[in-house]
Image (tube, rainbow, N blue to C red):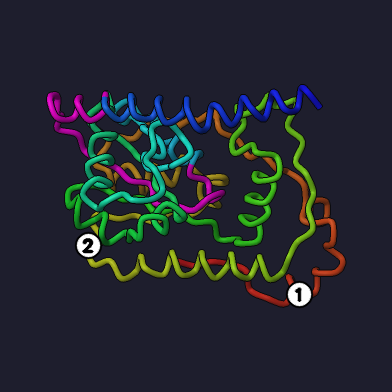
Amino acid sequence: MILFCLVQQRSFYKAVLVRPIERFLRRASTSLNYIFNKKDIEAIFIIASARSGSYLLQGFLASHPEIDAVGEVINPDIVRGIRRQMVSRAELFFHIKASINKGKKRMVVAKLLEEQFAMHDLTVADLMHEFPKAKFVTLYRASLLDQYISKKIAELTNVWKLGDKPAAEYKPQGFELDLQDFDAFKQRMQDFYQQLPEIENQEQLVSLTYEDLTTNAQTIFETKVFPFLGLAPVTIETEFKKMNKKTHEQTITNYSEVKDRLESKDYCLAV
């Protein structure tokens, strides 16, 4: 009990005192660097949703010698991010620009996720308008059921990529699937990705799927991604790997109860 209290106090202390100070110092350094050392950097934005393969895509892109990666620049839960509330549009865009300016190569890839767009009432069209010369790579997972399962497991284990915990200690947990929650997730994904076809300047945007990256990534990059970015092709590589290799039956503890419902509906996303 005493040990539990000490751990809780330490977590509270870190969240309330240490992290805000770290974030303030990081943002001050990033902002000053942007103001006094602004670089001519070509921005690449990954537009994705949680568990759609964005770590994998970012890793492949950053394996090119002309591309650097700065990660999720507006994630409120990490030091390099930005707070959830009371952020003006001007402050948000300045932070994104300053974060990209931290890159050390001529092209820098940053990642923004669906929930972060919702957090700041931001659309992909808004971002494209603010960054008219940037390139946008949208990523989605065709199987919404696989994406939902991956997201639930990540939330249960608090492991979002291998490296957060030693591989030997990572054990995906099963869970009971709530059909209402799953339907709500499906609707949210459809609403988010439906905005993309409305964007007129398709020279700024290319769309990929998680399934592309996990089955035929090298060919996809050579025929689609590198020509889009105007880069010479290279052999791509990344340290990120598929985490959960269990079947639906092994993962969903109430699979026999929801099987008919899942198989009777189309849970695939097409953009």
- Residue 234 lies in quadrant: top left
- Tag 2 residue: 201
Query: Considering depth in this image, is 187 or 268 the residue closer to the camera?
Result: 187
- Tag 1 residue: 261
In the figure, 1 relative to 57: above or below? Answer: above
Q: Is 33 displayed left or right of 7 in the figure?
A: left
Query: Considering depth in this image, is 183 or 61 the residue closer to the camera?
Result: 183
Q: Which residues are magenta?
A: 29-54
Residue 14, image x, y percentages? 53, 27
Q: Give the total of numbered labels.
A: 2
Q: Is residue 63 visible?
A: no
- Residue 142 lies in quadrant: bottom right
Residue 243, image x, y percentages? 66, 39
Query: Considering depth in this image, is 111 or 140 the residue closer to the camera?
Result: 111
Q: Residues within 10 Å of mark 2 (few under 14, many from 20)?
A: few
Residue 4, image x, y percentages? 75, 27
Query: Considering depth in this image, is 88 or 225 the residue closer to the camera?
Result: 88
Q: Secondary structure at mark 1?
A: helix
